């Protein structure tokens, strides 16, 4: 078992920035708002000859807007109690504050486990200011800068020196093939954190009746029946038009989208006492497009039972509102009482193995022949569409390549029909998502169009399946691009020809694609400059 190192301190001293810098990934949300971090965020660190688990905690003494100070402090206390080494972080720019003295007084009884680090020492002129923290009685302070990545090598060397178990022995990393990563997603206040605690059997994350309690994506590792699981508790989502009003919600949505992509199985948590909202449909659509095996977790089922609801009628009602996940198994749970919570882990392990399933090419082509006999593709091109044969290319999710005469002659809805037909005929694919790719067979007449082409993705919901692109931002971007185009046409004498200005605009749009905000909006359409030449000759009457 790897040793644990926790980072503690008052709010806004740079704990999350140091955590991300040591981990090497933007795991924790970094924001100037005090109290951004609430839960304990744990991640593995392997660098500079060290190998340990690092824990980021909330600020001690924070004044939380939702009155969660006691819950945050309990999480910090748990981190301090379980940590082998504690990095007490202070801010050199703020100097020695009374809150730092109070925290140091509580840590002085475990002085042998504490490392005093002074953050934000961005240049040599601030290094003499670190000596004032000697008054804390926690040993010599270490000058570091999480923003500039300075002093971190010395910090890692001291951790390894005081904690020999944290020394990296050079052994290869443990394979995670047997570990199942589960992402709990859903809209606000549906019970994701309560389910996480119920599965763990401990108050691992903060639970409150107020919406928006969870902000980061918190990884929790647990073992059951010899299997290892990683639960990813994510923040609740709202409409994308509301997301842009708050930066923290935007960053939380980014973490949620990343958690879905790295998860093996997604637990879509739904409130049984409430209507299916547009956010639930958006998340379900994104999960389906990403090809993740999904479990529909109908939480708070005790409230629905009080209204004399039945599981059969509710499933019919649910599949009518989420038709794209009609194949996904549903589990009716109650996080407070623990009703059927343990079934989630066993079903998730089964779905991960089913997503690795394969089918022989001969058997697949038999199923495809039956599918074509039952329903032939609708004629789109000048000639009928011909399906020659199919083969399975990948797993997780199972992906099938269907060879046809022309990919652009395939009707958009035919891939959906093939998915349902294969899922009904092949038992191993009954509960997992499928992908159908169409490829044109080699031909000398249309070599430029012989490419893999996913016929799905034609609808607006599939094109805009991302969770983090606010609608207002897209509208503002269109206005900005239109204004930039008009300036390019008006200022031809200053910036050259309009075509050069438009090419610069397209280059800037390509740079914007790295922001990771979902689908990029094509900013500048093709513009024809000048007047069209007049046609000579008489017009036919």
Image (spheres, rainbow, N blue to C red):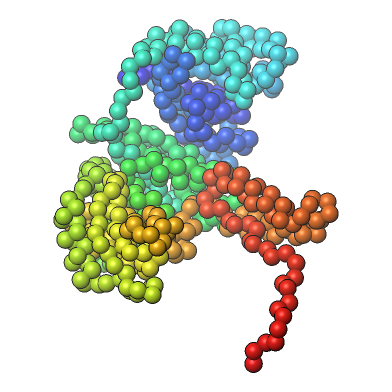
Q: Is residue 535 left or right of residue 382?
A: right
Residue extending furthest toward the right:
493
Q: Residue furthest bottom?
A: 541
452 or 515: which is nearer to us? 452
Which quadrant is the C terminus positioned in?
bottom right
Residue occupying image coordinates x 69% and y 21%: 93
Residue 229 placement: quadrant: top left
The residue positioned 84% from the left and 54% from the top of the image is: 493
Q: Residue at x 39, y 50 (%)?
A: 290
433 vs 541, left or right, is left
Q: Is residue 74 above or below residue 444?
A: above
Classify the position of the N terminus by image quarter: top left
Pick the residue in front: 54 or 48.
Answer: 48
Query: With 166 as the anchor, is 21 left or right in this view?
Result: right
Q: Position of residue 452 (x, y in %)?
A: 38, 54
Q: Quadrant of residue 31?
A: top right
Eyeballing the image, is 314 above or below 521? below
Residue 298 occupies which quadrant of the picture? bottom left
Left or right, residue 496 beside residue 241: right
Towards the viewer: 261 or 119: 261
Q: Residue 519: give x, y in percent of width and height.
A: 52, 53
Residue at point 52% right, 56% down? Answer: 239
Residue 187 shows up from this direction: yes
């Amino acid at each position: 078992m790897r040793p644990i190192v926790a980072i503690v301190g008052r709010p806004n001293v740079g704990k999350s920035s140091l955590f991300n810098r040591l981990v090497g990934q933007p795991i924790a949300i970094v924001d100037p708002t005090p109290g951004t971090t609430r839960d304990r965020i744990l991640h593995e660190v392997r660098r500079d000859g060290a190998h340990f688990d690092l824990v980021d905690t909330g600020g001690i003494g924070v004044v939380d807007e939702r009155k969660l100070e006691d819950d945050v402090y309990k999480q910090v206390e748990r981190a301090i109690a379980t940590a082998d080494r504690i990095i007490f972080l202070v801010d050199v720019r703020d100097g020695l504050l009374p809150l730092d003295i109070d925290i140091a007084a509580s840590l002085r009884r475990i002085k042998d486990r504490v490392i005093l680090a002074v953050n934000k020492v961005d240049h040599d002129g601030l290094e003499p200011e670190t000596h004032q923290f000697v008054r804390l009685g926690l040993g010599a302070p270490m000058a570091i800068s999480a923003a500039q990545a300075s002093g971190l090598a010395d910090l890692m060397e001291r951790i390894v020196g005081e904690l020999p178990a944290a020394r990296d022995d050079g052994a290869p990393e443990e394979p995670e093939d047997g570990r199942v990563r589960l992402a709990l997603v859903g809209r606000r206040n549906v019970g994701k954190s309560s389910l996480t605690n119920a599965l763990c059997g401990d108050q691992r994350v903060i639970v409150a009746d107020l919406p928006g309690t969870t902000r980061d994506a918190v990884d929790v590792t647990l073992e059951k029946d010899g299997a290892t699981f990683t639960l990813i508790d994510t923040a609740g989502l709202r409409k994308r038009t509301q997301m842009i009003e708050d930066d923290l919600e935007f960053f939380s949505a980014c973490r949620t989208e990343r958690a879905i992509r790295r998860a093996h199985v997604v637990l879509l948590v739904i409130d049984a006492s409430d209507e299916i909202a547009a956010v639930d449909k958006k998340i379900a659509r994104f999960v389906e497009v990403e090809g993740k095996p999904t479990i529909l977790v109908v939480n708070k089922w005790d409230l629905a039972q009080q209204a004399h609801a039945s599981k059969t009628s509710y499933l019919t009602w649910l599949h009518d509102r989420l038709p794209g996940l009609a194949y996904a198994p549903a589990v009716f749970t109650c996080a407070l009482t623990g009703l059927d919570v343990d079934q989630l882990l066993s079903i998730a392990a089964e779905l991960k193995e089913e997503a690795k399933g394969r089918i022989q090419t001969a058997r697949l082509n038999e199923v495809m022949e039956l599918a074509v006999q039952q329903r032939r593709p609708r004629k789109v091109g000048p000639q009928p569409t011909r399906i020659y044969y199919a083969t399975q290319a990948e797993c997780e999710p199972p992906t099938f390549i269907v060879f046809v005469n022309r990919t652009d002659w395939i009707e958009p809805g035919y891939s959906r029909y093939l998915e349902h037909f294969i899922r009904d005929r092949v038992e191993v694919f009954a509960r997992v998502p499928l992908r159908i790719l169409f490829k044109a067979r080699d031909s000398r007449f249309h070599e430029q169009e012989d490419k893999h082409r996913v016929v799905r993705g034609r609808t607006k919901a599939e094109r805009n399946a991302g969770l983090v692109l606010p609608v207002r931002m897209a509208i503002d971007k269109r206005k900005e691009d239109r204004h930039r185009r008009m300036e390019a046409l008006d200022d031809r004498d200053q910036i050259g020809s309009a075509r050069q200005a438009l090419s610069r605009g397209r280059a800037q749009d390509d740079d914007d694609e790295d922001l990771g905000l979902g689908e990029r909006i094509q900013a500048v359409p093709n513009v024809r400059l000048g007047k069209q030449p007049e046609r000579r000759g008489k017009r036919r009457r």
